[in-house]
Amino acid sequence: MWFLLPRNFDYYAPASLKEAAAVLKSHSDARVLAGGQSLLPMMKLRLASPDAIVDISRIRELHGIRQEDLV
Ligand SMILES: Cc1cc2nc3c(=O)[nH]c(=O)nc-3n(C[C@H](O)[C@H](O)[C@H](O)COP(=O)(O)OP(=O)(O)OC[C@H]3O[C@@H](n4cnc5c(N)ncnc54)[C@H](O)[C@@H]3O)c2cc1C
């Protein structure tokens, strides 16, 4: 079977928004990974070739949905 593979990239799974921001700032071509449903196929087809992936799934601050009073 023949597979399309993405080019090599660094993988980060930061535990906080602050850490994620630092990783994103330190790479010129980093992309955020959420569910990967769009990004990973794009990478396999080489339509996107980021040098780093920042997986935000472990960031507790981003878990869930909440409503806040913005006024
Ligand atoms: C079989 C299939 C059917 C689909 N059908 C539909 C459909 O009917 N309607 C529809 O609208 N969509 C559809 N989609 C698209 C799907 O909804 C998207 O793949 C999904 O919304 C992407 O979410 P994700 O979490 O997987 O994002 P990812 O693939 O992880 O990321 C997508 C992009 O968003 C960026 N990104 C992710 N999170 C952040 C963030 N916090 N900040 C900044 N950038 C970020 C990534 O870097 C990447 O560029 C379908 C996809 C598939 C595979």
Image (cartoon, grey):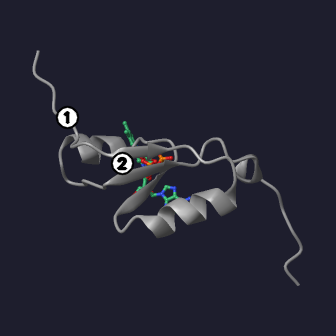
Q: Amino acid at mark 1?
A: Leu
Instruction: State if disc 1 and disc 2 touch (CB < 8 Å).
Output: no
Is residue 21 visible to the viewer in this orientation of the structure?
yes
Q: Residues within 10 Å of mark 2 (few under 14, many from 20)?
A: some
Residue 65 x, y percent position in the rendering: 76, 52
Mark 2 or mark 1: whose residue is earlier in sequence: 1
Image vertical order of residue 4 relative to residue 31, above or below:
above
Per the rendering, the mark at residue 5 is 1
Image vertical order of residue 24 relative to residue 2, above or below:
below
* Mark 2 CB within 8 Å of ligand 1: yes
Q: In the displayed orientation, state which residue is furthest to the bottom.
A: 71
Q: Describe residue 49's horizontal placement relative to residue 30 as left or right.
A: left
- Looking at this view, is 50 or 19 the one in front? 19
Q: Residue at x 65, y 41 (%)?
A: 58
Residue 42 x, y percent position in the rendering: 27, 48
Q: Residue at x 61, y 48 (%)?
A: 14
Q: Describe residue 1's horizontal placement relative to residue 70 as left or right.
A: left
Q: Quadrant of the C terminus?
A: bottom right
Q: Quadrant of the N terminus?
A: top left
Residue picked out by circle 2:
39
Is residue 38 visible to the viewer in this orientation of the structure?
no
Question: Regarding mark 2 in the picture, which secondary structure is present there?
Answer: helix
